Amino acid sequence: MRLSSIFTFLAGVLALLAFASGASAACTATPTATGTATYSPNAVTPATPSMGAGFGCANGSPLWISFSGNYVKATITASNGYKLSQAGAPDINYVLSADAAGTKPLSGSATYYVNGTAVDLASLIGFAPASVPVYIKPSVSGSVKSGVYTGSFTISWDWSLCSLALGSSCIGVTDKDTKSSIVTVNLTISGGRPATVTTTTTVVYDDKNGTTNPKSIPGAKQRTTVTVSNPDTSALASNTMELKIATPANTTIALDGDGAGGASVVFTEGSPASGLAFSYASSTNLGDDVEFSSDGGSSWLFLPTVATQGQVTHVRLKPRGAMAAGSNFKISVAYTVK
């Protein structure tokens, strides 16, 4: 190597070392932090909002995350047992997580490793974390009273970050400290828009007029249509929907269809789509999503045939799945006018 090249190389090394000696991850943990979120009652359970956990480093601070000596640890505790409270309302339990998907829970006394086996934040490679998040997932059962629910947890931060490493040695500045942050959580439950249900009945066929201006005369076919909409910003709870239709006066259920080509029970997906699953095979099929009652809805074991369809007093329809936010669908049942 020529002498000039050696001097150039040494100058580069000295510049790098000078940069490393003056660079620091400049991290800190604030004494207090606050996380806020607002959800409707239906949206509480699936929600996993993120919040600042009090720890962060100056933006752009250089850091070799791959250096084995680097770590950020957070030991989390909650004196109130991980509960959010509001006067006059049941507590809302919650768990903490290191990721939005909730696959790395931090409930109970847990240590959250930013660089280690517990959590591997690949996106941090090359830089110190500007803000380390923590995710909170509420857990509720039944209805939730509106209002502001509050709680807190404490994080004991312990970190050691080298600004520059050469092999297994730190040749830069090591930022190392231990501090605690108290994180206050404010969860606001407001609004909540329940599913809406509308029912209409339309004559679709009669023997004299066919499908052109059919009249409600004996033997005519009509459809009772139930339209369901979910105006909320969250999906409805999965497999909780039941629709019951009473047989209209002066009619019997039409197991042979509506006379206009429509089946006895028809599910029509809406726009936006509900995402629900629904099937109707036959009135005697025990595996589909339609059930019949002959005793006013007290039991749902009746399996009507064409000969006994006049005994049906109610139909129960049970779409499967979680109805998507802002979606709608229709289910209609055919009847024969007496």
Image: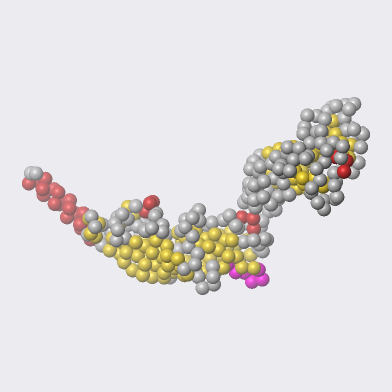
Residue 321 seen from this side: yes
Residue ID at (53%, 65%): 185
Residue 230 or residue 316, whichever sits in front: 316
**Most extreme residue toward the left, as rendered?**
3
Task: List x then y, in percent, for residue 243.
Answer: 75, 48
Residue 95 position, x and y percent, is: 53, 62
Is residue 271 located in the magenta-colored stretch of the structure?
A: no
Q: Is residue 24 at least partly visible in the picture?
A: no
The residue that appears at 68% across and 39% down in the rendered structure is 269
Front-most of residues 184 and 79:
79
What residue sits 82% from the left and 41% below the top? 304
Q: Magenta span covers which residues?
A: 84-89
Q: Main secondary structure of the magenta part?
A: strand
Which quadrant holds the C terminus? Answer: top right
Q: Tell whether 336 sits left or right of 8.
A: right
Q: Is residue 262 above or below residue 185?
A: above
Q: Quarter of the image containing the N terminus?
A: top left
> What colour-coding does the image apply?
secondary structure
**Side (left or right) of 91 relative to 215:** left
The quarter of the picture where residue 277 lies is top right
Q: Is residue 189 above or below residue 317?
A: below
Q: Position of residue 28 (x, y in %)?
A: 37, 65
Residue 87 included in the magenta stretch of the image: yes
Number of marks in the image? 0
Q: Position of residue 58 (x, y in %)?
A: 35, 59
Q: Quadrant of residue 137?
A: bottom right
Furthest residue in direction bottom, as rendered:
79
For the point 39% across and 54% down, which residue is it?
A: 121
Is residue 35 or residue 293 the one in the foreground? 293
